[in-house]
Amino acid sequence: MSQRVHVIGAGMAGLSAAVRLADAGRNVTLYEASPHAGGRCRSYFDKDLEYVLDNGAHLMMSGNKDISAYIDLIGSAHEVFALDRAIFDFIDVEFDKAWTIDLGAGHGRWSLLRWIFDATRRPPEVGALALLKEVLALRRAQGKTVAECLDMRTDQFRSFWEPLCVGVLNTKPENAAAELLWAVFEETVLLGGHAARPLLTRNGLGAALVDPALARLKDLGAEVQFGHRVRDLEFKDGLVSCLDFAHGAEVLGEQDDVILAVPHFVVGDLIEYVSAPQKSNAILNVHYWLNEPVETSLKGVVGSPVQWIFTRDHIASVTMSAADDWTDRDADDIAETLWPDVVRALNLKSHTLPSYRTIKERRATFAQTPKALALRPNTKTKHKNLFLAGDWTNTGLPATIEGAVRSGRMAAEAVLG
């Protein structure tokens, strides 16, 4: 039995690992460099908008088994809900077209086939056989980019594959690893519409995924220490022997374990032999305060820098993935540039630019290219009491919430094993 498990990093990967270990009866200490938990999934109160905002918008789906298990473990099922059907509304602001992709609510691949061969539920001007052919092409996508598997000149690429690729992988199709897109497809859409329904939060990501986890850790007797940035790891006799923090050192017992759940661009500074992906891609979010209340929903936007719009209460949150070309632009200029397409996409009555908050995540995820996949490290390391967690580790999934939560579960299981 481990005397104590030291989890470094309180993002979704670290929270996932810590909660599982504490629930299994282990003594857990969770360290976080910042004053808050959740990483990119945190929520905070914005004084200007007078509203609790998510740091960034994230799409979760009903087929995300690790997220569902995590939510059950922390007791926050009442904070999330899935749509009755896997329905995704789109609007093409360039050609003034709107359509709905309706994957239904069925189970199994026959459900997917029924969708493919139902023209009323597919993107417009997309042929069933062409779509089926491209699904099969992704299945054989190992080592290829999305652009190498799919024809970027087709209607279905513009109206279906490109929004899906950029939104899921935060990487442009000409660079994105196709096998990661297939991995998501395989765990959601291929299981039928029932597994592909959007999973939305009632009061934000913090209330659904972060705050209940911290409360659960407290109930289980775990320690959570904020403002603890690890500077170095010391090793002795094949083990991590000491954690060096800015304010002091934590000497470990011989039976202690360590889970390193830090960002991909940090791990190399702590463990020289770990070859984690280094290149990052940005995500841009603009939160607009709307004078008129809107239903909780999400909408895809084509023909615009705006890619996805999440709405809840009086907030419309725009998400732009693979946004490296935009991060050096002025925040006000970004909000003003995107606003007209938000008005058109949501069919708003008022065209006046409202209050807003622009958030730039310059290193939101690792650049999910075929070459980067070879750099993703496994959970176990050459030091028998050191384990890795993070959406950049070798989970088989992209850098999503599901990937982060899964990595934490894998690290916890390695410790318990």
Image: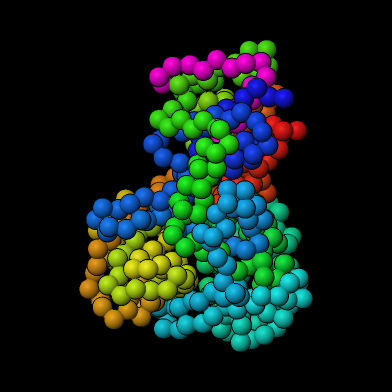
Q: Quadrant for residue 285, please give it.
A: bottom left
> Which of the two residues, 75 or 282, is positioned nearer the viewer here?
75
Q: Residue at x 57, y 75 (%)?
A: 87
Q: Quadrant for residue 17, please give it.
A: top right
Q: Position of residue 280 (x, y in %)?
A: 48, 45
Q: Residue at x 61, y 28 (%)?
A: 27
> Which of the two residues, 129 or 90, is positioned nearer the viewer here?
90
User: Would residue 147 be visible to someone looking at this image?
Assistant: no
Quarter of the image that includes the C terminus: top right
Q: Which residue lies furthest to the top in this view?
A: 237
Would residue 287 be counted in the magenta stretch? no
* 106 vs 242: above or below: below
Q: Position of residue 150 (x, y in %)?
A: 63, 67
Would residue 256 be counted in the magenta stretch? yes
Q: Residue at x 45, y 21 (%)?
A: 245
* 313 vs 21: above or below: below
- Residues rendered magenta in the picture: 246-263
